[in-house]
Amino acid sequence: MQFKDVIGQEELKSHLIQEIRNDKVSHAQLYLGKPGYGGLQMALAFVQYLFCENKQAKDSCGECPSCKKVTELQHPDLHFSFPVVQAIDKKSDFFLPQWREQIKKTAYFDLNDWLNEIDEKGRKPIIGTDESQEIIKKLSLKSYEGGYKVMVIWMAEEMNATCSNKLLKILEEPPAKTLFLLICDSQEYLLQTILSRTQIVKVPRLRVDEISNHIKVKFNLSPEAANSIGARSEGDYIETLDVLSNNHEHDENREVFIQLMRVCFKKNVIEMMEWAEKTASLSKEKQKIFLKYALHMFRQSIIKNYTEDQLTRVSDEEAQFLKNFSKFITGNNILDFSQTFNDAHYHVERNANSKILFTNICFKVMRYIHVA
Ligand SMILES: [Zn+2]
């Protein structure tokens, strides 16, 4: 993985490159941020730059033997630990073929995607006690190529307490030329003692333009479509992939949304009930995607109203609809709309009765839309 393959994050990239160029690499780093922000990608690009035999000013060369070995995830001094299902095997090495496969497919994935890859029964994966012994054993060996030995621990918050405790000593007094790269979604589940021994590298959420520029090229999208999807991704590229894979439903969502607004505006209770029933019959996943889509449309309406179009990130068809619709979303009702649809999303996830839920939404929308 080269830095150019990591989406956005230019500031962080140059900071990391500087660290290596100035020989100021700290031996234990904690990459902190949601998986969709790109922590794992960044760590892999960092390692490749570190090992590259022909470093360029802004990236590894991508061609030297070291670069090739890192790209294939076959470098003998690059080790990985990640959560695994203990009932299948207790050590990460057993799952390395799947790990390589997953990263080859896309390096933007989360624990759920990983679990889908390794266990059809969906049992909870952890980094356990046996793995900590593995880590210590691997790092006590000499490096094969005479440089750094690197241990990447993905989803470090999934280490169990024994594993964390066993690693404390080696984190405190690491063997020479040893580098720990811990990658972690949320620091709250990490032991304080681990945290205090690492240097935190914050991986911030991606900007909308970083995502939309990337997908415009990669998926050959129109600027409007790329912007619309970028704006709905919450700075998280995994979310982007989610939206993209459901993009054929985009038109469908728009129709459901338009219909809801129409029947509520007309105060036609029979049509409202029909709408609620139809929407409740969608799968939970589709319901959640629709609710997020609605939130996106409310946000874009407000932006349109208050910035005279400048910032709206919508597709052509959405723009057409918003032209007349956006005036119904104002400071008087935006908070109510947001709260209602956010709450609904929360409840769908927790298996609320969808028919009641969408009926409630209808009556609330009817009220809110008439106070604009
Ligand atoms: Zn190279």
Image: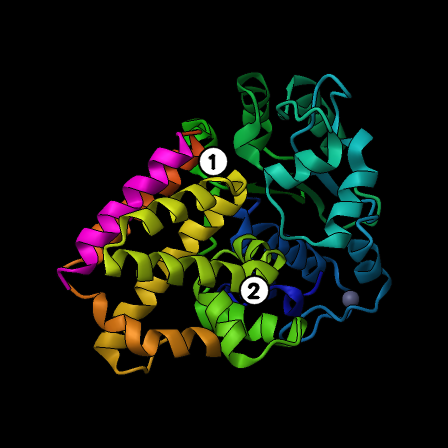
Towards the viewer: 371 or 142: 371
Q: Which span is picked out in magenta?
A: 353-372
Residue at left 30%, top 69%?
301
Q: Secondary structure at mark 2?
A: loop
Residue at left 30%, top 45%?
361
| The N terminus, quarter of image | bottom right
Separation (CA) of disc 1 from disc 2:
22 Å
Residue lying furthest front in this view? Answer: 270
Towards the viewer: 62 or 109: 109
Left or right position of 33 against 338: right
Q: Is residue 285 above or below residue 323?
A: above
Report the amino acid beneath label 2: Asn
Towards the viewer: 99 or 349: 349
- Indicate which label's residue lies in the foreground, 1 or 2: 1
Q: Measuring from the top left, give residue 204's x and y in whole percent.
A: 44, 57
Residue lying furthest right in this view? Answer: 65
Task: Look at mark 1 in the image and give the residue it sits on.
Answer: 197
- Residue 22's tag is 2
The quadrant where ligand 1 appears is: bottom right
